Amino acid sequence: MLPHQFFKMLSDETRMRCLLLIAREGRLCVNQLTEALDESQPKISRHLAQLRQSGVLVDTREGQWVYYQVSSNLPGWLNKIIEGLKQSNCLQAQYQKDTDKLNAMKACC
């Protein structure tokens, strides 16, 4: 993936929010993301599919649940960008509601 492709993909706020939460938490399922972002399951699944198809995320199945995490096979420049986004204080403050909703959630998976 080239940088312009990555940044174009993240120009959608839902994909950005999904990636940030997954990067911070390690791995999440669709139910956790729909609750945290207050979006419909089809919308979240569609955005996760784009992130997965691009190679940024990978999915693993555990029984009936599918978990998403950042791929370990990303080029170094992309890992640095994702790590920078994850560590950004201003982004963390901007999307604090997402994290709060995720933390308030009862275990679902």
Image (spheres, rainbow, N blue to C red):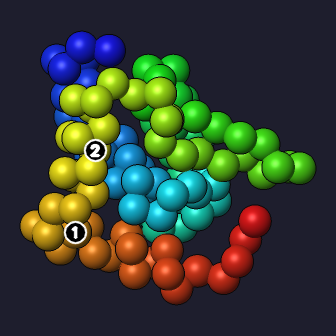
What residue is drawn where x is 37% and y is 70%? 98
Name the spot of residue 3 as percent of width and height, x first.
19, 20
**Badge 1: residue crowd in 10 Å (few <14, some 14–19, many ≥20):** some
Question: Is 107 placed left or right of 81 in the picture?
Answer: right
Q: Dot 1 corresponds to which residue?
A: 92
The residue at 61%/52% (across/down) is: 30
Residue 24's place in the image compared with 53, above or below, is below
Identity, as a three-letter code, of the amino acid under mark 1 = Gln
Q: Nearer the viewer, residue 91 or 12?
A: 91
Residue behind mark 2: 82
Q: Amino acid at mark 2?
A: Ile
Residue 8 seen: no
Q: Which mark is residue 28?
A: none
Quarter of the picture holding the C terminus: bottom right
Question: Residue 62, how many percent across, how many down?
Answer: 82, 49
Between disc 1 and disc 2, whose residue precedes? 2
Q: Where is residue 29 drawn, in percent x and y?
A: 63, 54
Residue with the most extreme left position:
90
